[in-house]
Amino acid sequence: MPSARAGARRTSCARRAAEGPGGRAVSARAGLGAAPADAARGGVKPSRARRSAGGQRRARAPLRAGGFDAERARRPALGLRFDVDGRRRCERGRNRCCGLGQRGRGRRSMAKKKIAILGGGMAGLSAAYQLTKTQALRDLHDVTVYQLGWRLGGKAASGRDKLNRNLEHGLHVWFGCYENTFQMLQELYAANPPGGKLPNWQAAVKPQTYTPLGVLLEDGTWTYWPLTWPLNDATPGDGTLLPTWSDMIEVVAGWIAEAIERHWQPAPAEAVATAGLPPQQAGLTHAPLLPTNATPSRALRAAQQHLDALGSDLSSLSDQQMGHFHDLVGWARDALVGAPFAGTSPIDHQILSEVLDIFAATTRGIWEDLVIPDKPLESLDGTDFRAWLILHGADPDIVKNSSVVRIVYDTLFQYLDGDVTRPSYAAGSGLGVIMRLVGTYKGSMMWDIQAGMGEVLVAPLYQHLLAAGVSFKFFRKVTSIELSADGSLVQTIRMDRQAEILTGDYKPTFGVDGLTVWPSEPLWEQLVDGEKMQAKKVNFESYWCDWPPVNPQQVLQLGTDFDIAILAISLGAYKPLNDTDVSMCAQLIAKSKRFADYVGNVGVVPTQSVQLWCDPSSAGLGWTTGKAATVSGPEYLNIWADMTQVLAFEPWPDPQPQSLHYLTGTYKTTLYRQPSSNTGVPAQASDEIRTQAIAWLNSSSYPLWPIADVNGVFNFDVLHVTEPATGAARFDQQFWRANIDPTECCTLSTAGTTQYRLHPDQTGFANLILAGEGSRHGFNTTAIEGAVMSGAAASRAICGQPVNIVGYDFLQRLPSQGPGT
C-alpha cells in the first residue's frame, strides 16, 4: 500500500542520507565554514556527471548564455558581524555567526544587541522565538516587537467577538510538510501546554485526510470528487531528512496506481488495442509487463519498481533508464485515456485521466529541465506552471480546464488582483510546493486546527516570548524607516502611537474556558478614550483608519533604541500603491535598486473569507460523505472546510449551532491600492463581500449542501442567529471579511518574479534584516511555513542560529545535491 510504502521510503531515505556513500556515516549538515555546495550536501561533494544511455558518464551541460546561474544563486549573501569595538561590518556568509561565536574567538563580551522587530506576524514572532530560544541567546539579545493594533499573528491572527465566537482572517489548515511550524508548536507545548482542552499538540492539530476536489461538469453543474489521502507513520516536526525526488515520484506513482485499481481501468486486451504493446526492457527492474497482463495500474507499478531498483538518486540515471520510466507512464496514460470507458463513474475516469496526464508531463519536465542540466527548481520560475506543463506534453485542454491543475492556484491564491481569469504561478515554485505538499508530508497530508489559530499557536508563542524576556509594544504603526547619512544603515524608525494605555503595558489577551484568547477588537477599557473609540468602531489594523495618533510619535534611534531592525511587516505595506501615500520604505526604495525591484515586482493579492454557523449538522445540510476540506469549487468561495470542531471551544448557550463552515478564496478587486485618505474603502469592500457571498450561497452552494437549497435558492433559515431575523438578514449575524489591507494581502508568486525576492540578509542595509512570506525561502509562496522559515532565517542572519532550517533551500538546491533537510 502507498501509505506503508511512504513511511518505509522516508525511513530508508533518512538512513541513506545518514550513512552517505558506501554506508559511511556523514554529518546531516556541514559546519558553517563549508563551501556552499558541501554545506547543502552535508559535507559530501555532489557528482557533477551523468550516465549516458550506454552507461558512460556524461559531463554536466554548460550554462547557456543568459541562463540561470545556480552557483550565483547559492552564493552566501551579506551577513552581519561585530568587530572588537562593537561596530558592525559586512561579511560574506549567510550562516556566519555574528554573536554566539565571538567570545570563543577571544573577543571581549559585549552588551546585549538591541533588536527591534517591526511587525508581530508569524515571521516576526518566529524570529523572536529563535533569537531567544536558549539562555545563551537571551544573554545576547534584547528583543522588542512593535505591533500595529492590539493583537499578534498577522494573517494568522484570530479573535473572539462579544459572543465569544472565534473569528479568523481566513481558513487556516496546515500541511504535513510544515516541518518548522510543527516543530515550533511541539516545542511550545512541551515546555508549557495551554492546558484545558489543549493538553498537548496532538489535541491542537489533527489529521484531515478527506479533501474532495470540485469538478465543473460539461452541463455547467458542479460536483465533488472524493479524495482521501493515505496516512503514514511519520511525525511532522521531527526534523528528519526529506525524501529524494525519486522517492517522491515513486510514492505518487503508487498512489495513482492504487486509485485506478479502486475505480476502473481497461482490461489488458483493451489497453493493448488502445495504446499498443507495453514498453519492454532488457533488464529485470520490474515485474514483466506482457500483452496478457498489461493494464494502466500494472504499468505504473512497473514504473515504480523500475525507479526503486535503480536507487534514490535521479542524477545517477541514464537517459535510457529514465526513458523507460517515461515510456511506462506514457503507456499507462494512453491506455487509460483512450480506452472506451465501461465503468460506473465517468468522473472517476475523467479525474484519473487528468492526474495521469499531468503526472507524465511533470516527471518528464523534472528530468529534462532539472535533472539533466542539474538546475534548481527556481530555474523554472520565468515560466508559468501551466505553460511549463504544456511544454512537456500535457494536454492543453486539461491544463486549462482541469480542477487537478486549479488546485495549486486556488490553494495558494495565485491570481493577479484576485481575478481567477488571470492565473500566474512561477513554475519552479509551484512545482516545488506540489512536491513538498504531496511528496514530503508526514502523518497526514493536511492537518486541521482545532480552535482559533490565535489560540492554538499565537497565544502560546506570545506567552513563551514574554517569559523569555521579549518586550511587546502594541498600537505602533511604522511610518518611516530612515537611513544614515551614507545610506548604509537604518538610522531612525518612526512610528505613530495609535492609542495611549491608561496604566502600565497593554494586556492583549483574556481567558475563555481555561484557554488564553485574543479579542476581535481592542480591550477598550485599557485605552485612553476607549469608549469614544469603541463608539466610532475604530479599527487600528485598517490602512484607512483615520483616528488621530497620540502625540508625540515614537522615534527609535540607532545605538540608543536598536542596533538591528528586522522588517517583518507584510510586503504590501512597503509598496507605493498609489500616487498619494508615501511608503514607509521610501528611503530604502530610493537608495537600493535591488530592494526597489523586490518591492516593485513581487505582488500581493487580496482575499476574502466567510464563516457560517448553522443549526443543522453538515449531514443535515446534505453533505453526507464525512468531514471535509475541499478545493477548486465554484468561484470565488472556491475553498470550503467543515470546521465544526471549533464549536467545542466556543461557549454557546442552548440551542447551539451544530456545524461551522469556513469558506475562502481570492477577492477580485483593486481596492487595496486606494489612498489611506479614502476612509470609505473598508465599508465598500465589506458590502461587496456580503453581496457576493449571498449570491454565491444562492447560486453555488447546492453541491455542498443540497438540503439547504429550496427551489434553487439557499435557505438562510439554516443559519444560526442569536437575534430574531429571517431570510438573507440572518447572514448579517455570520462573519465575513475582506482582506484588502496591504498588510493582510497574501504574496503572489507570479512567473518571472522569483529573481527579485530577497533572502533575509539581502536588504542591502547592514543592520536591516527581512522576514516574511514574501522573502525568499523554501516555499516562495504564501504559507505560514514560509513565514516561520523566513523568521528563523532572519535570526540566523543575526546570530547564526538555527543552523538548520528544514526545507529552507529546497527550491535553490541542485538535483545532484539531493533534497536536503
Image: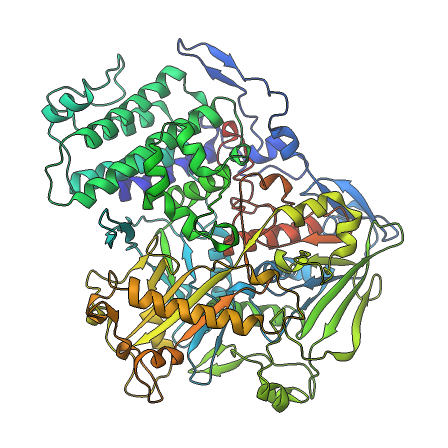
Instruction: Give the percent coordinates (x, y) of residue 182.
Output: 46, 56
> Which of the 4 image quarters holds residue 578?
bottom right
Residue in the picture at 58% in, 81% down: 522
Q: Nearer the viewer, residue 566 or 21?
A: 566
| Quarter of the image with the N terminus in it | top left
Residue 242: where, in percent of width, then height? 45, 41
Give the colouring mode of the picture.
rainbow
Total marks in image: 0
Coordinates of residue 693 in the picture (x, y in percent): 38, 68
Quick check: can you spot residue 535?
Answer: yes
- Relative vertical location of residue 23 with respect to residue 582 in this rendering, above or below: above
In this view of the protein, which residue sits in the foreground, 636 or 450? 636
In-image side of 296 versus 412 (left or right)? left
Identified at 46% across, 67% down, the residue is: 453
Q: Is residue 724 positioned above or below 404 on the image?
A: below
Residue 421 place in picture, x, y as percent: 43, 48
Q: Residue at x 81, y 59 (%)?
A: 482
Figure check: 121 above or below 17 = below
- Is residue 150 shown above or below 255? below
Q: Is residue 808 left or right of residue 564?
A: left
> Residue 529 or 563: which is nearer the viewer?
529
Q: Is residue 251 visible?
A: no
